Amino acid sequence: MRKIIESTFVTTDGVIGEPHRWGAPYWDDEHSEYGTNLLFGADALLLGRDTYEGFAQVWPTRPADDPYAARINAIPKYVASRTLAQQDTTWNATVLQGNIVDAVRALKEQDGRDILKFGTGSLSHTLLEAKLVDEYHLWIFPAIAGSGDRLFDGYPDLTHLQLLGTTTFKSGIVVHRLAPL
């Protein structure tokens, strides 16, 4: 069975919104290597609509000779959306049909490597509640955003996670690998 790995950038005060604003000063070779290993360990992406739309505007414009850009552009994307129709998508994307929990469960049962999920929002709440995410890679940046969308904001249930490992970068980013108990 395939694993779903959620990779999320977060500030020390829990903000996930606009990582390009507060994260860029910390993006270095260690950051790139870790992210590249995650991406190349996966053979598909799982995205919510907002993340899909943002990524689909940016990634196809990146240089084709960049191995990360080439990989992210080439692999299939599965999009959870109540409003997008299949004909509205580009960028090698498929809109998941029907019940999202059943659709994601079916993806996990397919043969293949990990499924990498970027972005944290209502899809993350649904997947957490259904216990479909196998690992969370929370990239904690040494920055305080002050305001913005927060990690799992509004999630109603207490959920405990098990620490699987920690990676610390010279830049100050700490990645916690966590799994639901």
Image (spheres, rainbow, N blue to C red):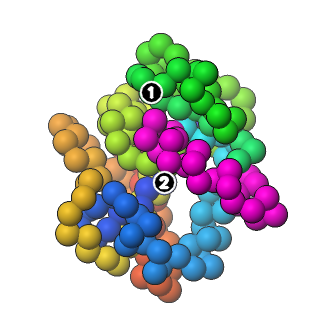
> How many angstroms separate mark 1 from mark 2 (CA)?
19 Å
Identify the disc placed on residue 106. none
Locate residue 116, reporting x and y percent.
Answer: 57, 45
The 10 Å Cα crowd at callout 2, few under 14, some 14 to 19, many 20 or more, is: many
* Residue hosting label 2: 7
Residue bounds of the magenta highlight: 47-71
List the single residue furthest toward the top. Answer: 98
Depth check, front residue: 5 or 119? 119
Question: Dot 2: what SS?
Answer: strand
Identify the residue at image location x=50%, y=48%. Answer: 54
**Residue receiving disc 1:** 81
Q: Residue at x 47, y 75 (%)?
A: 24
The reply, left or right, for residue 163 in relation to residue 5 is left
Look at the numbered disc 1 and give the secondary structure of its residue.
Answer: loop
Q: Where, by quadrant of the figure, is residue 173 drawn? A: bottom left
Quadrant holding the C terminus? top left
Q: In the image, what residue occupies the spot 50% across and 86% down?
A: 170
- Mark nearer the N terminus (1 vs 2): 2
Q: Is residue 28 visible?
A: yes
Question: Is 153 rendered above or below residue 68?
Answer: above
The residue drawn where x is 72% and y is 42% is 75
**Residue 49 lies in the magenta-colored region:** yes
- The answer to whether 173 appears left or right of 117 in the picture is left
Q: Amino acid at mark 2?
A: Ser
Q: Main secondary structure of the magenta part?
A: helix
